[in-house]
């Protein structure tokens, strides 16, 4: 067999595997995918939104990453019941959750300091089949084995898992999507409290990796608290210095 023929066979096999992966990620249910509310982003994703079954990673150490992760959590929950948030440090701030459309009465908050404790909580929560979504924060990256366990638990429980990694993950994982979120300006930091919350939080987000489509897409987005959706804004319209972490973390 010639080299061109071998390449053609390999390309065909890759296409078949990719199709199988996409089919296994979603099902025939109309609720299997959630829209982010921004057509510019939904149209790039192979599913026209984010699958409700599987793991989605968010990278970043700024309040922007936290805000974007909670925005995704709010989109997944959207009147579908309880969610779980496993965090490492300060408690989630009730009024800030309301801003994102999340009712603290329907949020199970769990504090876990060690990464393996966080992963254990997420696995158990995903398999419970009684939650709309789960969100976990870890300071380090996770390896392929831990990622496979989370992905299997998410599929078993038919529940989306959002994993907020405070360190950039260069490891291979089974996550369906991987995002990076950064502040829109240098004024936003990890400080808690101090600033008044005015306007709508905005973030620079990047689709680093996505199963079924090339990554590398960038947007500046804002969270619309009235519609509880993401909106893409142009750089010229970006005037916000709002810190997400001010909204979501209780000042101490």
Image (tube, rainbow, N blue to C red):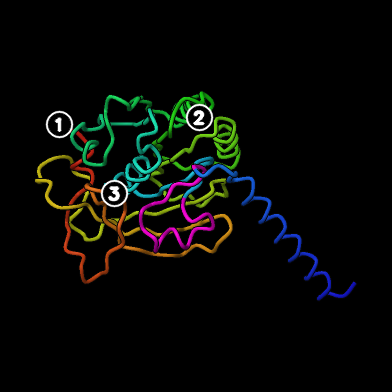
- Residue drawn 47% across and 51% down? 178
Give the percent coordinates (x, y) of residue 230: 31, 53
In front: label 2 or label 1: 2
Q: How crowded is mark 1: few (under 14 residues within 10 Å), some or many (20 or more)?
A: few
Q: How many labels does the image show?
A: 3
- Closest to the observer: 91 or 100? 100
Determine which residue is flagged by label 1. Answer: 252
Q: In the image, residue 105 lies at what x, y percent?
A: 28, 24
In this rendering, the answer to whether 182 lies above or below 165 is below
Measure the alpha-carbon separation of dots 2 and 3: 26 Å
**C-beta proximity under 8 Å, tags 2 and 3:** no
Task: Work out whether mark 2 precedes mark 1 in sequence or the reverse, and give the earlier one.
Answer: 2
* Residue range highlighted in magenta: 31-49
Given residues 131 and 120, the one toward you in this image is 131
Secondary structure of the residue carrying numbered label 2: helix
Question: Is residue 44 found inside the magenta-colored segment of the image?
Answer: yes
Going from N to C along the chain, the mark reached first, 3 or 1, is: 3
Image quadrant where one finds the N terminus: bottom right
Residue on which the image places disc 2: 126
Q: Do the residues labelled 2 and 1 touch (CB within 8 Å)?
A: no
Q: Within 10 Å of the Cα at label 3, are there few (<14), some (14-19), or many (20+) other Cα atoms?
A: some
In depth, the one of 180 and 157 nearer the eye is 157
Q: Name the residue under label 3.
A: 62
The answer to whether 248 is drawn above or below residue 64 in the figure is above
Mark 2 or mark 3: which comes first in sequence?
A: 3
The vertical placement of 225 against 222, above or below, is above
**Residue 21 in the image, given as x and y percentages of width and height:** 64, 50
Residue at the (27%, 64%) spot, across then down: 233
Element marked by disc 1: loop
């Amino acid at each position: 067999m010639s080299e061109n023929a071998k390449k053609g066979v390999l390309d065909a096999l890759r296409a078949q595997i990719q199709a199988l992966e996409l089919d296994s990620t979603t099902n025939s249910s109309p609720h299997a995918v959630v829209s982010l509310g921004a057509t510019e982003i939904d149209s790039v994703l192979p599913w026209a939104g984010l699958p409700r079954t599987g793991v989605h990673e968010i990278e970043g150490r700024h309040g922007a990453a936290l805000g974007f992760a909670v925005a995704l959590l709010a989109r997944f929950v959207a009147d579908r019941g309880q969610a779980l948030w496993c965090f490492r440090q300060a408690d989630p701030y009730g009024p800030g959750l309301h801003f994102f459309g999340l009712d603290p009465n329907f949020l199970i908050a769990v504090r876990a300091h060690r990464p393996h404790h966080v992963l254990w909580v997420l696995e158990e929560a995903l398999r419970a089949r009684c939650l709309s979504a789960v969100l976990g924060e870890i300071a380090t990256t996770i390896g392929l084995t831990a990622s496979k366990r989370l992905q299997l638990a998410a599929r078993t429980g038919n529940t989306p898992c959002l994993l907020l990694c405070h360190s950039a993950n260069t490891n291979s994982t089974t996550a369906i999507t991987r995002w990076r979120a950064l502040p829109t300006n240098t004024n936003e930091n990890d400080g808690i409290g101090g600033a008044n919350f005015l306007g709508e939080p905005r973030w620079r987000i990047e689709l680093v990796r996505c199963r079924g489509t090339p990554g590398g897409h960038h947007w500046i987005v804002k969270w619309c608290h009235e519609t509880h959706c993401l909106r893409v804004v142009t750089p010229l319209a970006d005037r916000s210095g709002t810190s997400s972490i001010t909204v979501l973390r209780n000042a101490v």
